[in-house]
Amino acid sequence: MKAVMCPHCRTSMAASNGRETCLTCPRYALPGDTADDVERHETERIQALALLDVALADHDATRTRDRKITDEMEARMGQTIQTRGCSKCGGTMYRTVDTDENGNPTNMSQFICNGCGNME
C-alpha cells in the first residue's frame, strides 16, 4: 500500500479509522482521495468551524441576554431563577426557587424549557 502524502505538509499520512490522517495538521484523506480532495475536506472543515464560531457567538449573546433578564426578575420577585441547557432541544430551561429571608432555598419547581416546553 502506497503512503498517502499530505499536500500541505508534504509528509506521510498515518492510517486511522478508515482514513489517512496528517500527523502535523488536521488534513485527512479518504480511500481514493486526490490531493484536491484533501484540500476540499480542509476547506469544508474550516467553513464548518467558522459557522460553529458564529453559532457560539450568537449563543453567548443569548445567554448574556437571558442572564440579564433573570437577574432583573430575581431582584423584583424575591426568588432565585436557575437556568440550564435542555437535554431535549438544547434550549434554555428555567425554574424558580423560593428562598427564605436568608436566601436559602425553601421550594423548587421543575425546570421548563423556553424552546420546546420540555419539563425535567
Image: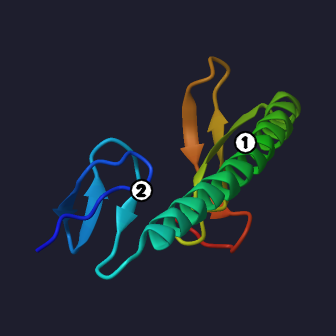
Looking at the image, what colour scheme do you see? rainbow
Across and down, in percent, residue 104 comes to 56, 25
Image position of 102 (left or right of 2): right
Residue holding disc 1: 60
Depth check, mark 2 against mark 1: the one in front is 2
Badge count: 2
Query: Which residue in the structure is indicated by mark 2?
Result: 7
Q: Are marks 2 and 1 in contact (CB under 8 Å)?
A: no
Q: Is residue 72 left or right of residue 97?
A: right
Query: Who's the residue at 44% across and 50% down the image?
Result: 8
Work out which residue is located at the far left of the displayed protein and give it.
1
Farthest bottom residue in view: 32
Instruction: Give me the residue at 35% from left, 68% from top.
Output: 29
Location of residue 100 with respect to 7 vertically, above or below: above
Kind of residue at badge 2: Pro
Mark 1 residue type:
Asp
Using residue 72 as the reference point, say whether residue 92 is left or right of it. left
Q: Position of residue 111 (x, y in %)?
A: 59, 58
User: How many other residues sit within 10 Å of disc 2, few (<14), some (14-19) or many (≥20)?
Assistant: some
Image spot of residue 103 (x, y percent): 63, 22
The answer to which of marks 2 and 1 sits earlier in the sequence is 2
Q: Quadrant of residue 106?
A: top right
The image quadrant where one finds the N terminus is bottom left
> Which residue ends up furthest to the top in the rendered image?
102
Q: Which mark is residue 108?
A: none
Q: Quadrant of residue 85?
A: bottom right
